[in-house]
Amino acid sequence: MSQTPIWKTIALALTADIAEGRFATGDRLPTEAQLAATHGVNRHTVRRALAELARQGLVHPRRGAGVFVSAAATDYPIGKRVRYHQNISASGKIPGKRVLSLITRAADKTEAEALNLAPGDPVHVYDGLSLADGQPIAVFQSVFPAARLPDLPEALAENGSVTRALRRCGVADYTRISTRLTARAADAVQARHLHLIEGAPVLHSVGINADPQGHPVEYGKTVFAGERVTLTLDDDHG
Amino acid sequence: MSQTPIWKTIALALTADIAEGRFATGDRLPTEAQLAATHGVNRHTVRRALAELARQGLVHPRRGAGVFVSAAATDYPIGKRVRYHQNISASGKIPGKRVLSLITRAADKTEAEALNLAPGDPVHVYDGLSLADGQPIAVFQSVFPAARLPDLPEALAENGSVTRALRRCGVADYTRISTRLTARAADAVQARHLHLIEGAPVLHSVGINADPQGHPVEYGKTVFAGERVTLTLDDDHG
DNA sequence: CGCTATGATTTGTCTAGTTGTATAGTAGTT
DNA sequence: AACTACTATACAACTAGACAAATCATAGCG
């Protein structure tokens, strides 16, 4: 569905390379074959892009020798779109939260396995929305073992913070024992909550948190809006 | 009585062909014209069937080349010190890398800042493709300071492994000092390399690796195919 | 030292085949 | 009348492969 031909994209990329100093005046560009490989296209497509640059006078090819930069680009369109960037640590502490629903029900097989329970055991399920500057950042679902944390719903309802709610229920500290990340396309529900169009890229995070004794206390899934979120993995180790 | 459309029948037939191994991953399907002839329909009818398979991620078309069978999902764990080869082999896949291009050029502003250099300083740029069982998992670009690692290109060209190449150039060990992750839509170049359709969700990772003294030795960007890669963040401590 | 021969590399050109897109038309159904 | 499914045709964009022509590095030789 790319309405702009590939060769134009490549021509723009090369123009940017020259404009930003990655190739200076007089430098030889990579060979057509190399450019074709890096851009994943046929050599002829690269040739068409180079022909455009040559037409503009940016480069001049020499048969048998290579393609050389003749002048720096004076004007090239800057394709950088303005994006909102929200840095979030992998542990998942996020400023604002909105409770979407808070129910207690039976655990399914996946949840039971993650929390070290038997299928059918009661779990608290907390569906919510993470916000920053009024913008929706992520939708999440946290699943807690109800038997171990009977009073969690009330604690959660008060301030929404998982950390504080857990602390009030006797879990002073907890650590992430695994996190799995992948990129997906937003489904209709996620798109509506995150103010995205359906199919927009979202960052899926599935993780398990455990108390210091190693017992799982939370099984959480988070779906971040790819357009607005950059996950920063910080290495605070010992 | 609404009969099932012809294109759905064709799509189902092709799906069965793939599922039962008559077309393996990476194989090229018969051309649209051939399929149209064998099914006795117009090319556009075949195209609609193929579009459905592409939407499902079963196949990916390449203009001018043909329609190819895509790969299935894999699992790609990363930890702080864990390296690429060990990981994939741990999950039962055979890892590999393919060099797309390997050039030395001037650093732009961003690269210079990341590697603690001055803009215009020479850098080695390694564009490559990460593979598992021969199927593309990610495209990456690694940028190295050329002054500090003059012999890196030859070392890289031999086996493609960044870790071993760095070791041969005197960098025995290195650690990630920052990683940023986000979800994006695949652009045309990424889609072609990763055998995806344009707009499919991909996982962007930008990171800096430094030697034990804290000097940056690599500025790397990686784009994972969201459909078939899950990053697993292990606990570090190791 | 200077010159040439040779082979590898790189750009230029050509032919053929395949997918992507646009437009227009037909038959059947609602 | 409007919609859906399909047909028909034409062209654009890209791939694939082969070969020619210019360049460059190097080895050999006078």
Image: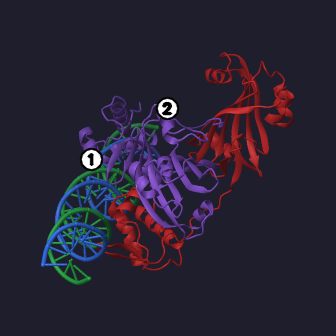
Chain colours: A red, B purple, C green, D blue
Q: Residue at coordinates 50% horizontally, 49% vertically from top-left?
A: B167
In this orientation, which residue lies closer to the viewer: A100 or B181? Answer: B181
Q: Residue at coordinates 56% horizontally, 65% vertically from top-left?
A: A79
Residue A223 is situated, as x and y percent measured from the top left of the image, at 65, 40
- Crowdedness near tag 1: few (<14), some (14–19) or many (≥20) residues, C-alpha within 10 Å: some
Q: Is residue D16 above or below residue A29?
A: above
State whether residue B179 appears in this view.
Answer: no
Chain letter belonging to callout 1: B
Q: Amino acid at mark 2?
A: Ser
Q: Residue at coordinates 78% horizontally, 40% vertically from top-left?
A: A98
Q: Nearer the viewer, mark 2 or mark 1?
A: 2
- Crowdedness near tag 2: few (<14), some (14–19) or many (≥20) residues, C-alpha within 10 Å: few
Labels 2, 1: one chain: yes
Numbered circle sitting on residue B50: none
Q: Is residue A200 left or right of residue B130?
A: right
State whether residue B193 appears in this view.
Answer: yes
Q: Residue at coordinates 39% horizontally, 51% vertically from top-left?
A: B158
For mark 2, give the secondary structure.
Answer: loop
In this orientation, which residue lies closer to the viewer: B100 or B236? Answer: B236
Question: Which residue matches tag 2?
Answer: B91
Residue D27 is situated, as x and y percent measured from the top left of the image, at 22, 66
Mark 2 vs mark 1: which is more N-terminal?
1
Residue B202 is situated, as x and y percent measured from the top left of the image, at 53, 47
Q: CA distance from mark 2 to mark 1?
A: 40 Å
Residue B125 is situated, as x and y percent measured from the top left of the image, at 48, 60
Locate the C terminus of chain B by quadrant.
top right
In this orientation, which residue lies closer to the viewer: B49 or C6? Answer: C6
Q: Quadrant of residue B111?
A: bottom right
Q: Is residue D18 left or right of residue C19?
A: left
Q: Amino acid at mark 1?
A: Ala
Question: Which residue matches tag 1?
Answer: B33
Query: Do tag 2 and tag 1 residues touch (Cβ < 8 Å)?
Result: no
